[in-house]
Structure formats: C-alpha cells, structure tokens
Image (spheres, rainbow, N blue to C red):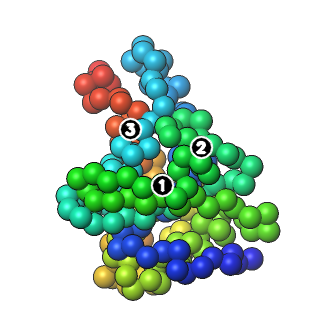
Amino acid sequence: MKTNLDANIIQSENVIIADADYIDKVAFDLIVNFERMIGRRIHEADMARWLDCIALDGGIREGESQTQVILIHDKKNVGLDNFVPSNLKHELNGKAFRDNLGEFVITTLPIEDMVSREDFFVDILRVATLQTSVKRIMIVPDTETYYNNVVHALRNVDDSKRMTVFSMQPMPGGNFRQEILGYSLMNALGISADEIKP
C-alpha cells in the first residue's frame, strides 16, 4: 500500500531520511556495549551533532546550504530514548538549527496504521529521488529488515544525485555510496577513538 505523501514536503537540495526507531535502537546497543568496554557512563546522543556527521559523510561541506531531515517513526513512539533532544513531536518536528554546514530543518513523520514501516520509508525515499531540486540524499534505513527494498528503490535513480546509504556494516552494493552508521553515532555519543584503542 502506498502512502499519501505530499511531494511538496521535500524541497531542499540536501535530504536526510532516517528511521528514527532504528537509530534509537542502534544508539542503545552502542551505549550498552561501550559503557562496558570503556568503563564510564555514556550519555544520550546529541541529535544535532549526529546530523552534522551524517551530512559530512554524505558530502555536505561548510556553507549556506539547507538540509531537510525526515525522521520516520512508529506512531506510538512519542520520543527517542537515546537522543537529545528526544520528543519527536514537540522538540524535533518543525524545528531547525544552523551551524557551519548551513541550516537543518527537521520533520518527523509517524508511520500510519495502514502502511508498513518498510513501504513508508521507501515511498518517502522515492519521492525524494524524483525531486529535481534534490542533489544529495543521505539514507539511514533499518538495514536489518528492509535494506533490499532500499537498494531496489535506488536502482534507476539519476546519476546526478549523490546518494549515501548508512549501515552498521558493509552491505551488498548498488548505485550509491555506503558509510558506516556507527561512526556518526559514536561521535554523537561522545565516544572518542582514543577511548577504544586496544
């Protein structure tokens, strides 16, 4: 079943599409594992810092660009447990911040009852790929459950668009770049490379 997503929701040159429930789960796993490994308390991930890392990995550089962030989430989830700010509706949706990479504008989209998480994510991704104004798309799907559908959705996308898919480990390729999601989350969690050297 297809979503009734308004194509006008995507208007920026740069777009980050992330499965918020998935990144929250991965952040939790990293916190648990690294607290044990490095022997200190790890606080919630800084959402703005994480978005900056994703943007840099996706090819955005210093300047006045605008990046649209779309966080999809289960309708029953009001917030993220392992990020700050965390409330999807009141602290993140419709909010923006500006730094040396330009302006980031955040939209949170709850998954409707009549559509699967996978279909909802892929529909938003397809809408983004069809917008002529969009030049870069950074994609953070739940690679454990619907990675193949993302690859399928990207197979015929115009070569002029720079697409980067983030996953926790290298995945079978497609016509897009790949980056490791864990690095950006570790940065946002304040875990330094020096702390994890053997």
Look at 34% across and 37% down and name the residue there. Answer: 187
Q: Which mark is residue 95?
A: 1
Left or right: residue 19 versus residue 96 is right
Look at 43% across and 60% down and name the residue there. Answer: 105
Three-letter amino acid code at the position of disc 3: Ala
Look at 36% across and 69% down and name the residue there. Answer: 14
Left or right: residue 174 versus residue 3 is left
Mark-to-mark CA distance, 1 and 3: 19 Å
- Using the image, determine if residue 105 lies above or below residue 195: below
Sequence-wise, the earlier of marks 1 and 3 is 1
Left or right: residue 138 versus residue 20 is left
Percent of width and height locating residue 101? 26, 56
Left or right: residue 23 versus residue 100 is right
Percent of width and height locating residue 196? 32, 25
Classed neighbour count for the residue bearing mark 3: other residues with Cα under 10 Å, few (<14), some (14–19), many (≥20):
many
Sequence-wise, the earlier of marks 1 and 2 is 2
Mark-to-mark CA distance, 1 and 2: 11 Å
Q: Furthest-left residue in view?
A: 62
Mark-to-mark CA distance, 2 and 3: 17 Å
The N terminus: image quadrant: bottom right
Residue pointed to by mark 3: 188
**Residue 8 visible (yes or no):** yes
Q: Which secondary structure lies at badge 2?
A: loop
Answer whether labels 2 and 3 touch (C-beta < 8 Å): no
Residue pointed to by mark 2: 87
Sequence-wise, the earlier of marks 2 and 3 is 2
